[in-house]
Image: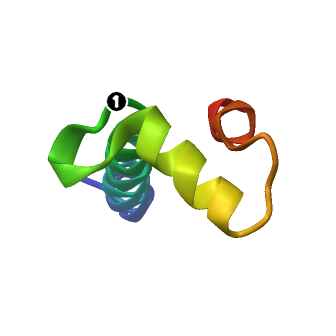
Amino acid sequence: MSAYDRRDLGLLLLRLGAGGVLAAHGAQKLFGWFGGHGIEGTGQFMESVGYRPGKVSATA
């Protein structure tokens, strides 16, 4: 395995890890998975910090 192959493998692992974290965070906000409150809870939070309408802002 050359140095370029190891670098490519390392970058792939970093991208998969970062993508997994972002996907889990999105699923938490959108679907309520992993202990999240779903789109309704996210919309309520967004309204509480001044984004109106909250559910539309959360969906976007």
Is 22 on the left-hand or right-hand side of 6?
Answer: right
Q: Which coloring applies here?
A: rainbow
Instruction: State the residue in front, 57 or 44.
Output: 44
Instruction: State the residue in front, 54 or 3.
Output: 54
The amino acid sitting under disc 1 is: Phe
* Residue 27 position within the rendered picture, expressed as x and y whole percent measured from the top left: 36, 37
> Which residue ends up furthest to the left in the rendered image?
34
* Residue 26 position within the rendered picture, expressed as x and y whole percent measured from the top left: 44, 42
Tell me where residue 60 sits by quadrant.
Answer: top right
Residue drawn at (55%, 59%) of the image: 45
To which residue does mark 1 refer?
A: 31
Is 8 on the left-hand or right-hand side of 52?
Answer: left
Residue drawn at (22%, 38%) of the image: 33
Total labels drawn? 1
* Residue 56 position within the rendered picture, expressed as x and y whole percent measured from the top left: 73, 31
Q: How many residues crowd around disc 1 within 10 Å: few (fewer than 14), some, or many (20 or more)?
A: some
